[in-house]
Image (spheres, grey):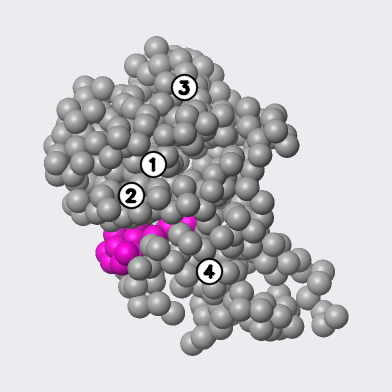
């Protein structure tokens, strides 16, 4: 296992329950991107009323979380940088008031270059935010226009430099590959531009076309790169990030030593996290639950609760306790997203069965021979080539009916 990956997981192990993560959804955008399936609306006039409701929901959940210390807070969206300095002060004060925040808590805010002004960045840093995730996506102006972004490459560069000037020394940039008509050279230029800015973290995601988005309704007219180009872009990312001193710790995430996203790691190692706001998901006390993607209903519900007893039912989209088999499947799927891979002795101790027997020794051997998977020191992990087709490999490994030797 890579030494940096070992250090990441060891640090997390020291912070297991009663530590938890807190995610707060900010469901507003100036303009919805045509590829985006995250829940957000363009009705920014509702921000004030939404913050009232979100603060009320924090108060509601604070008692249930009283035994937990919060060591990561993540404000995602949407576009959180649309909030004003005054709104941020109110929101961050509410987090401090309702939850037990540790002194070294990682506090991340997602920002977009078109709305993250130098003034706002300085205010966020003063208020205690210590990590930024900047939605750049590309440093190619033609591609930025094609995917509906409201900024250009210069604005993205200026935003990173303004964040550094404001005092942020832990900055992540989001990039995308597999974009319509995107060439390998265009993606290489974006990677090199990101690296040249000296940021501490890169997140790079392949475009996934969702049916209920404008891109999804375009069909073949979208002119996406073929599978080979898509894989070549991903492998180039892995190579250039490694050469620039970033270590890969998850399929899509690369960090300088000590700068892996502690919050996102909670999702992959199944640590508890609470997500508040419409569309937010949680994994808490053995349950997974999510709130309806209904902003106006969410605001209305918390207004009405001032006059009656609290009842979560109108807000919940789903709530279910994770079964033992689901826990096994989640552990395999999420662990194999990490370069540290699956800890086989820990898996056997937790579930009372061997990973290799569960998924089929012959399947593991097949992928190992193909250079897509490696098994060392009690760990099973995917190689960069395996990560490039991880969805296919994971679907095969989790097909319990195919465990027998063919």
Q: Are marks 2 and 3 in contact (CB under 8 Å)?
A: no
Q: Earlier in the sequence, mark 4 or mark 3?
A: 3
> Of helix, strand and loop, which one carries label 1?
loop
The C terminus: image quadrant: bottom right
**What is the distance, in whole Å, between disc 1 and disc 3 at their CAs?**
19 Å
Residue highlighted by disc 4:
384
**What is the distance, in whole Å, between disc 2 and disc 3 at their CAs?**
25 Å
**Residue 384 horizontal side relative to residue 356, left or right:** left
Q: Quadrant of residue 201?
A: bottom left
> Of helix, strand and loop, which one carries label 4?
helix
Residue highlighted by disc 3:
31
Q: Earlier in the sequence, mark 4 or mark 2?
A: 2
Residue highlighted by disc 2:
193
Q: Earlier in the sequence, mark 2 or mark 3?
A: 3
Residue at x-position 34% and y-position 41%: 134
Q: Is residue 398 one of those drawn in magenta?
A: no
The N terminus: image quadrant: bottom left
Q: State which mark lies toward you, 4 or 2.
A: 2
**What is the distance, in whole Å, between disc 1 and disc 2 at their CAs?**
7 Å
Q: Nearer the viewer, residue 79 or 230?
A: 230
**What is the distance, in whole Å, between disc 4 and disc 3 at their CAs?**
35 Å
> Of helix, strand and loop, which one carries label 2?
helix
Residue at x-position 57% and y-position 34%: 35
x and y, in percent, of residue 351 in the image = 61, 74
Q: Are marks 1 and 3 in contact (CB under 8 Å)?
A: no
Residue highlighted by disc 1:
139
Q: Earlier in the sequence, mark 1 or mark 3?
A: 3
């Amino acid at each position: 296992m890579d030494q940096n990956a070992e250090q990441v997981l060891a640090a997390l192990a020291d912070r297991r329950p009663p530590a938890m993560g807190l995610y707060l959804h900010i469901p507003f955008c100036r303009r919805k991107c045509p590829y985006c399936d995250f829940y957000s609306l363009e009705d920014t006039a509702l921000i004030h009323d939404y913050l009232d409701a979100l603060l009320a929901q924090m108060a509601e959940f604070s008692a249930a979380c009283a035994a937990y210390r919060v060591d990561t807070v993540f404000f995602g969206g949407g576009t959180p940088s649309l909030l004003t300095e005054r709104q941020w002060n109110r929101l961050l004060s509410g987090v401090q008031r309702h939850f037990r925040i540790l002194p070294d808590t990682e506090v991340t805010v997602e920002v977009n270059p078109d709305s993250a002004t130098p003034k706002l960045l300085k205010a966020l840093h003063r208020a205690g935010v210590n990590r930024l995730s900047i939605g750049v996506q590309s440093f190619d102006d033609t591609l930025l226009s094609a995917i509906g972004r409201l900024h250009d490459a210069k604005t993205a560069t200026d935003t990173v430099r303004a964040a550094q000037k404001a005092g942020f020394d832990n900055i992540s940039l989001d990039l995308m590959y597999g974009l319509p008509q995107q060439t390998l050279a265009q993606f290489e230029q974006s990677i090199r531009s990101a690296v040249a800015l000296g940021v501490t973290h890169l997140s790079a995601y392949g475009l996934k076309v969702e049916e209920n988005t404008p891109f999804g309704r375009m069909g073949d007219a979208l002119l996406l790169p073929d599978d080979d180009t898509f894989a070549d872009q991903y492998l180039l990312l892995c190579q250039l990030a490694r050469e620039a001193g970033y270590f890969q710790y998850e399929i899509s995430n690369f960090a300088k030593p000590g700068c892996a996203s502690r919050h996102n790691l909670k999702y992959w190692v199944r640590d508890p996290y609470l997500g508040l706001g419409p569309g937010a998901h949680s994994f808490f006390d053995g349950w997974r639950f999510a709130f309806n993607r209904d902003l106006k209903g969410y605001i209305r519900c918390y207004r009405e609760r001032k006059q009656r007893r609290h009842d979560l039912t109108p807000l919940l989209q789903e709530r279910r306790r994770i079964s033992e088999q689901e826990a096994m499947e989640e552990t395999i799927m999420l662990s194999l997203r990490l370069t540290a891979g699956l800890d086989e002795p820990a898996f056997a101790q937790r579930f009372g069965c061997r990973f290799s027997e569960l998924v089929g020794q012959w399947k593991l051997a097949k992928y190992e021979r193909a250079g897509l998977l490696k098994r060392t020191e009690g760990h099973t992990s995917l190689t960069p080539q395996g990560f490039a087709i991880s969805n296919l490999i994971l679907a095969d490994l989790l097909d319990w009916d195919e465990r027998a030797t063919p």
